[in-house]
Image: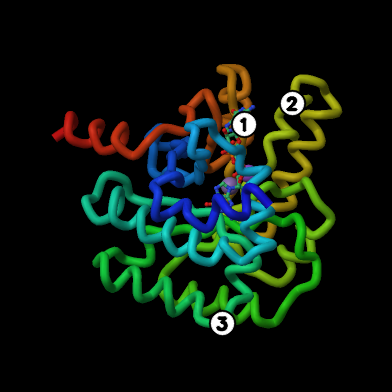
Amino acid sequence: ENIAALLKIAIGQNLVSLVYQPIQDVKSDRVEAVEALMRLKMLDGTSVPPSLFIPVAERTGAILELGRWAIRTVCAELLADDHVRVVSVNVSPIQLKTPGFATSVATILGETGVAGSRLAFEITEGLEMEMHSDILRCISDLKLLGIKIWLDDFGTGFAGLSWLRLIDFDTVKIDRSFLHDCGTPSGKAMLQDIITLVRNRGHKILVEGVETDEQMALMREFGIDKVQGFHVGRPAPAVSFQAKRTLRK
Ligand code: G
Ligand code: G
Ligand code: MN
Ligand code: NA
């Protein structure tokens, strides 16, 4: 397959890169974290969306090398030079299931001199419904390194509630689909119920997909901890975060 072949040469040929989307702390009004998102280009320069290449990378196992590359790159281009406090990285269940994953992360932290507490790993509630004991063990190893574990896209699948029972997530990211109809009374009530459920379990709450002033005001009213979305900022290359910090100095 085309994409599978592309993934094999992607790192060596500089076809893969990371962009970062800011995450705003609602109380302080500051960007306290950014989410790393992987980008892939074909040899002719056209880009392949993650919805296409991530599943292929998971199927072929290429996600293991790409995942290590992403964590190393995040540590080297943003965390080692103190450009941002925390970076969240999406990790696939395939990575968490692979023996030695936590050890390889520890090695990257050691080599780059970055504290584990500066990283958060986002796990999507979708796909993998069965709860592998390997995954739970890996997560507790990652926590020992100080890495925060976030639940991504909460509310989109059936597995989310079982994940919540088994893993003590630092933060739960509420999927942006819940913001779409929060303009209607029933949509607003739905979002409020989800927030109550997550908050009562002791997790911090991040709402994704905040685009308007009205939505931002609602997030303050609901007492949401963190927001992400076009209202805060779009995904951008590392250099735009490096530059900001330099100007402030
Ligand atoms: O940027 P956006 O469409 O482009 O990202 C869509 C989704 O692709 C993300 O929410 C995430 O689930 C997935 N994704 C992006 N980058 C990575 C990555 O580095 N690793 C994994 N496993 N998934 C990623
Ligand atoms: O699944 P994951 O949520 O991590 O993917 C993030 C994706 O969502 C990225 O592709 C990003 O471009 C997109 N995204 C981020 N903020 C917004 C937003 O406010 N509105 C919309 N429509 N998409 C967003
Ligand atoms: Mn994510
Ligand atoms: Na998400």
Q: CA distance from mark 3 to mark 1?
A: 34 Å
Give left or right: position of 100 versus 237: right
Q: Is residue 203 visible?
A: no
Amino acid under label 3? Pro
- Give the camera-side residue of 104 and 52: 52
Residue ID for mark 3: 99
Q: Locate residue 184, reporting x and y percent.
A: 81, 21
Query: Does the closest atom of ligand 2 sit within 8 Å of the Cβ of label 1?
Result: yes
Please name the amino acid that badge 1 sits on: Gly
Of pointers 3 and 1, the one earlier in the residue sequence: 3
Which of the two labelled residues, at mark 2 and mark 1, occupies the earlier sequence position? 2
Check disc 2 and give the amino acid type: His
Residue 180 has which mark?
A: 2
What's the residue at 49%, 33% (across, down)? Answer: 44
Front residue of this view, candidates 57 and 42: 42
The mark nearer the N terminus, 2 or 3, is: 3
> Are the two marked residues, 3 and 1, in contact with CB atoms closer than 8 angstroms?
no
Q: Nearer the viewer, mark 2 or mark 3?
A: 3
SS at mark 1? loop
**Percent x, y for residue 81?**
21, 51
CA gap, disc 2 to disc 3? 40 Å
Tag shown at residue 209: 1
